[in-house]
Image (cartoon, grey):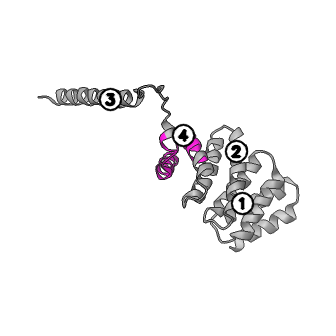
Amino acid sequence: MTYKKIITKWIVFAVGFSVFVLFAHTSALAAPEEGKPAKKLYPAAEFQNNPTLMFRVALRFSQRGLYARAIPILASFVKSFPNRAEHRRATFMLADAYFFIAKTGASIEFDNSIKAYLLALSLYPQAPQMPAAYYRLGQAYKTKHKAAEAQVAFRILLERAPESPQAPQAQLEIAERYIQLRDPKSAIIEFNKISKK
């Protein structure tokens, strides 16, 4: 047998088997019991009773950059399972997903990311994700032309996590804001703080 024939037979087998499994699965699930109407199946419905699976699927989507798929799962998880160990991580992942979608051009998602970051930071103020969350919150405010709120987010980051990797970036954002306000003395002070580290 040639290589092409083997591949072709394998593809035909795989497609046929997949169709068989799909047909058997859907007909068994869709067949109503006697006297009861058929239930509609929704893909997310199977997650509702399995929070671990729900979190893992959302995590996988987020890791692959499929934020639009992760958001509804994460939002449902955050709302439905506040006592789960993964809740803190899911809350920050939800905010990050909104933020990264917004950075691709869907600026309405900056509003959602701001709300999600505020929620996550109010629930978990000492979380390891806190420095990155405050930095991204400041970035979201800055993009929405809310400079005062952005400055507050950057200042809180500097107060609560001065040694974090995001701290110099936040300091730079503050200095740039002073330049925009035509306050070079304050900008120089902020730049000097960066160079001292």
**Labelled pair 3, 2 in contact (Cβ < 8 Å):** no
Residue at mark 3: 24
Residue at point 55%, 58% (across, down): 84
What is the crowding at mark 1: few (fewer than 14 residues within 10 Å), some, or many (at least 20)?
Answer: few
Magenta residues (range): 46-75
Residue at point 58%, 41% (across, down): 72
| 24, 95: nearer the viewer | 24
Question: Which residue type carries mark 4?
Answer: Arg
Q: Secondary structure at mark 3?
A: helix
Q: CA distance from mark 1 to mark 3?
A: 48 Å
Question: Which residue type carries mark 2?
Answer: Asn
For residue 69, the mark is 4
User: Is label 4 or label 3 in front?
Assistant: 3
| Residue lying furthest left | 1
Question: Which residue type carries mark 1?
Answer: Ser
User: Considering only order in the chain, which callout, 3 or 1, is on the residue closer to the N terminus?
Assistant: 3
Residue at mark 1: 122
What is the crowding at mark 4: few (fewer than 14 residues within 10 Å), some, or many (at least 20)?
Answer: some
The quadrant of the rendering that contains the C terminus is bottom right
Q: Secondary structure at mark 4?
A: helix
Would residue 64 be counted in the magenta stretch? yes
User: Considering only order in the chain, which callout, 2 or 1, is on the residue closer to the N terminus?
Assistant: 2
Residue at point 11%, 29% (across, down): 1
Residue at mark 2: 112
User: Considering only order in the chain, which callout, 2 or 3, is on the residue closer to the N terminus?
Assistant: 3
Q: Secondary structure at mark 2?
A: helix
On the picture, is 180 further left or further right than 38?
right
Q: Main secondary structure of the magenta part?
A: helix
| 55, 34: nearer the viewer | 34
Q: CA distance from mark 4 to mark 1?
A: 25 Å
